[in-house]
Amino acid sequence: MATISTIIPTIGRVESLRALLESILRQTRRPDEILVADGSDDGAIAALIAEPEWIAEGLKITHLKVSPPNAVRQREAAIARANGDYLFLLDDDVVLDPDCLANMADLLDAKPELSAVTADFSNHTWSNPTKLWRCYLWLFHGVGKGEWQGRVIGPLLRYGYNPSPTEPMPMQWLGAGNSLIRRSAYDAVDGFSDFFLHRCTMNEDVDLGLKLSRQGPILLHPGARLAHHHAPGGRVSIQDAAEDDIYNRYMVLRRTCQLPRFNAWQLAATYTLLEIISNLLGGIRRWRFDGFVTRSIGRLKGLARAFRQTDSTHSIS
């Protein structure tokens, strides 16, 4: 039986992490080891992991301190210490259904051609494109209603399945917080890329998924489910997140998808413009504009930074 290493980056979310570890205790197939990469600036996470109940219940947890915090760097630090045949990538604010890992591992065991399996969500559905994005998909990519499911299209528009399927379905990308990856496939693509801007590293999951899909198919398993609670703590500012989204999106298009520089920037610019318009229309409809200006400024900063980007080597800052 393949061995499984669970990889969890965290930053100050003690209670969310506790809930996750408790859900791992309830798994019908437990991981062989858990590696927690801690970007916090205090000892609260270390104290949680040191609690005796985890050892008493048979969980093997390794605590790694990673500073400064960076989601990719934290995951990489944990993966470097991992011994498993499979890497179970989780966020620190998810809670697993009891059969989640067993269902994912069984599918990966049964289909050696797969590079990864990703879990479905139990507490929300995958988003469908807005009317504006549906028009874009149809006019510029010929993608009709529902044909976007499981795909990555244009300026890295990525979609799951809504409604949820009844059997495993192909995905062109995966989430870094709900996926089981074959270690050999991860190593074959040299893992995560190194060009992400700030510590939140937005779009690192679609980037890794695109690379892994070249090694073998990725499947969404609707029988493997978890709840994602989107804990608020430890997040970067709205403006930094928006800047990261656009700049990192450009870098994935340029480096991973290997588009010409202008084409990659044009797609990033298209995404920026349509997102600003979509957010503005949504704000007018609800008559609420919370974060609109800040988010728009961040996106424009990301676009400007992408425009200035050369093809020289770029590392995480």
Image: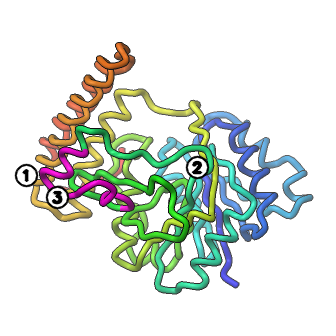
Q: Position of residue 84 (x, y in %)?
A: 63, 75
Kind of residue indicated by mark 3? Gly
Mark 1 lies on a secondary structure that is: helix
Mark pair 2, 3: CA separation: 34 Å
Q: Quadrant of the N terminus?
A: bottom right
Which mark identifies residue 62? none
Mark 2 surroundings: few (<14), some (14-19) or many (≥20) residues within 10 A: many
**Dot placed on the residue nearer the N-terminal end, 1 or 3:** 3
Residue 289, magenta (yes or no): no
User: Which residue does the image show at 70% across and 44% down from the upper left?
Assistant: 17
User: Which residue does the image show at 31% across and 57% down from the upper left?
Assistant: 148
Q: Position of residue 41 (x, y in %)?
A: 61, 34
Q: Position of residue 126 (x, y in %)?
A: 46, 49
Mark 2 = which residue?
Answer: 91
Kind of residue indicated by mark 2? Asp
Mark 3 lies on a secondary structure that is: loop
Kind of residue indicated by mark 1? Phe
Mark pair 1, 2: CA separation: 34 Å
Res. 190 in view: yes
In-front residue for pair 178/11: 178
Mark 1 = which residue?
Answer: 262
